């Protein structure tokens, strides 16, 4: 059975990463973080992307 990855709202990702929600949107537009754009225009960030950024910070 396929397991679907958890998708976070930009505000949730921002809180985990300790940045402002607008920073998350800026990173998405710059291509620094992968996101899925919904038909409503809002973004969802895969949890793996948040983990990738957190791991990159700890190096």
Image: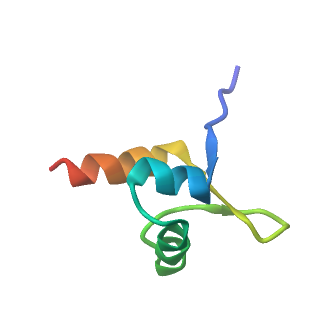
Relative to 23, say whether 11 is above or below.
Answer: above
Q: Quadrant of residue 1?
A: top right
Residue 40 percent location from the top left of the image:
84, 67
Q: Nearer the viewer, residue 41 or 21?
A: 21
Residue 3 percent location from the top left of the image:
65, 27
Residue 33 percent location from the top left of the image:
47, 64
Q: Nearer the viewer, residue 37 or 57?
A: 57
Q: Residue furthest top?
A: 1
User: Please, which colouring scheme is shown?
Assistant: rainbow
Q: Nearer the viewer, residue 16 or 37?
A: 16
Which residue is at a point 52% across and 52% down the rendered structure image? 13
Q: Residue furthest left?
A: 59
Relative to 3, say whether 9 is above or below.
Answer: below
Relative to 51, say whether 4 is above or below.
Answer: above
Q: How many marks?
A: 0
Q: Nearer the viewer, residue 15 or 44?
A: 15
- Asked whether, in this view, residue 54 is left or right of residue 34, the answer is left
Relative to 30, say whether 15 is above or below.
Answer: above
Residue 29 percent location from the top left of the image:
54, 79
- Asked whether, in this view, residue 8 is left or right of residue 23, the answer is right
Which residue is at a point 74% across and 66% down the rendered structure image? 42
Which residue is at a point 84% across and 66% down the rendered structure image? 39
């Amino acid at each position: 059975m396929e397991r679907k990855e958890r998708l976070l709202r930009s505000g949730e990702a921002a809180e985990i990463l300790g940045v402002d929600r607008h920073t998350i949107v800026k990173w998405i537009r710059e291509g620094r973080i992968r996101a899925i754009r919904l038909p409503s225009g809002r973004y969802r960030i895969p949890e793996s992307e948040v983990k990738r950024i957190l791991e990159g910070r700890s190096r």
